[in-house]
Amino acid sequence: MTHTYKLSRRLAASHDPLSDVRRVMLLLLLLLAISCRDGLTDPQTPNPNPEPATAGWVSVVLTTPNGNDGAVQLTLSGAPIDSLQLIGSGFASLVNGTGKLLVTGTVQSGIVARIWVPNVRAIARYQGSVDAAAARSTYQLQDLTQGYSLRVTR
């Protein structure tokens, strides 16, 4: 017998047949872990097919508990507002994307203004507040804790 033949027989006798299976399984587990890594480490991955932003008008709805309001001061903030259109009488302005409104006359619950926004699907990002309200005939300030609210709707 030659020396090479003896060496090959010795190596063949010491070879574990399951070691190849273990190596293949380890390689497959490693590949699986690498393929799942991106989803686990980056939860902020954007949706590959997001709905496109649709610009448009949305309504500003005032709720007032009083029937004798003559002036109500409002503020709209949150995401940027492009344009502001008052329904009825009063004054409105945009300062750095924030809407300031003064609704005057016979103020009742309902739509008091419309705003043009870059994405009508993102109206939850807009907040409105009632800053002050006055009675129509006496100009006495109304109690704002009694049910005044402002919301933005589609």
Image (spheres, grey):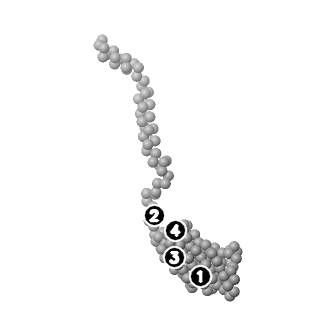
Dot 3: few (<14), some (14–19), or many (≥20) neighbours within 10 Å? some
Looking at the rendered structure, the secondary structure element under dot 2 is loop
Label at residue 94: 3
- Amino acid type shown at disc 3: Leu
- Is 13 in front, or is 69? 69
Q: Earlier in the sequence, mark 2 or mark 4?
A: 2
List x then y, in percent, for residue 147: 68, 74
| Helix, strand or loop status at disc 1 | strand
Q: Give me the C-alpha separation between circle 4 and circle 1.
A: 22 Å
Residue 52 appears in the picture as rendered? yes
CB under 8 Å between discs 4 and 3: no
Q: Nearer the viewer, residue 4 or 100?
A: 100
- Spatial CA span between label 2 and label 3: 28 Å
Name the kind of residue labelled 4 in the image: Ala
Under circle 3, the secondary element is strand
Callout 1 crowding tier (Cα within 10 Å): few <14, some 14–19, many ≥20 = many
How far apart are the two marked residues, 2 and 4, measured between alpha carbons?
Answer: 18 Å
* Residue located beneath label 1 in the image: 103
State whether residue 75 is above or below residue 13.
Answer: below
For marks 4 and 3 on the same chain, the one whose residue lies earlier in the sequence: 4
Identify the element where label 4 is drawn: loop
Nearer to us in this view, 119 or 23 = 119
| Residue 85 location (% of width, % of height) | 51, 80
Mark 2 near mark 3, Cβ–Cβ under 8 Å? no
Amino acid type, label 1 = Val
Name the residue rendered at 43%, 44% in the picture. 35
